Amino acid sequence: MAEEENTKNAATEKKSNNMLIIIIIVVLALIIIVGAVVAFMLMGSDNVPANTQVASQTSEKKLPQTRQSSDEYSDSRKLNDIGILYPLDTFTVNLKSDSGRRYLKVTMSLELEGKELSIELDNKSPVIRDRVIRILTSKSLEEISSKKGKQKVSEQIMDTLNAMISDGRIKGIYFTEFVVQ
């Protein structure tokens, strides 16, 4: 009888040891999986290519201000229909980001309705730069990385600037350099 009890105890003890080992293995596997998911999520934003570029930085030559790719803009005007272009200085701003590691370098030209507007824009240059910087810094990488996003930013800048000028209006905005890093 004692032998039978020892055999039952040994079998029960062996089953509980096996069950304990299985539980430990499952818990370790879960810890590793959760750690991998957390690491992927934290470092996931860093896996975006270091240079997301629309404009080529390799060539140092500047293209003429009137040369634009017609497929990048939703308006269907021909190159000959483009009015007077008013180039703005380059803007380098931090993008809205959780990690704070992304910045945008953009150069743009404004298409003006008339020549008289360029004088007003010269006089209001600091205010124009301020408004454009405020708009660009409020955007995240996701908001500006698509074609639609760039068009939306362009329209927002155009609407904001048109609201503050009186000698005409801005008909379009053309990005001549657009680099996100």
Image (cartoon, helix red, strand yellow):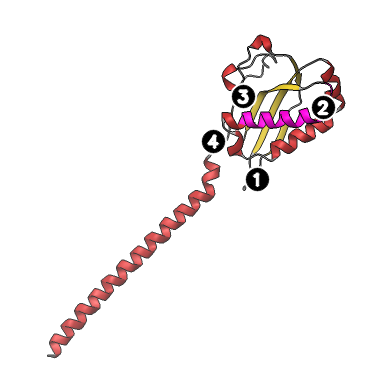
Identify the residue under disc 1: 100
Left or right, 48 with reference to 136 = left
Q: Is residue 52 visible?
A: no
Mark 2 belongs to which amino acid? Ile
Depth check, mark 3 against mark 4: the one in front is: 3
Q: Residue 129: x percent and y percent?
A: 79, 32
The part of the image, by quadrant, that contains residue 143 is top right
Query: Could you tell which of marks 3 and 1 lies nearer the N-terminus?
Result: 3
Mark 2 Cα-neighbour bin, 10 Å: few <14, some 14–19, many ≥20? some
Depth check, mark 2 against mark 4: the one in front is: 2
Q: Which residues are magenta?
A: 150-167
Q: Of helix, strand and loop, which mostly describes the magenta segment?
A: helix
Identify the residue under disc 2: 165
How many numbered dots are placed on residues in this image? 4
Q: Which residue sits at x=57%, y=36%?
A: 50
Identify the residue under disc 4: 49
Identify the residue under disc 3: 55
Query: Could you tell which of marks 1 and 4 lies nearer the N-terminus?
Result: 4
Q: Is residue 70 above or below residue 159?
A: above
> Element under label 1?
loop
The answer to the question of whether label 3 and label 4 lie on touching residues, with beta carbons closer than 8 A, is no
Depth check, mark 3 against mark 2: the one in front is: 2
Q: Nearer the viewer, residue 133 or 158?
A: 158
The part of the image, by quadrant, that contains residue 115 is top right
Report, in whole angstroms, how far the alpha carbon at label 2 lies from the one at label 1: 33 Å
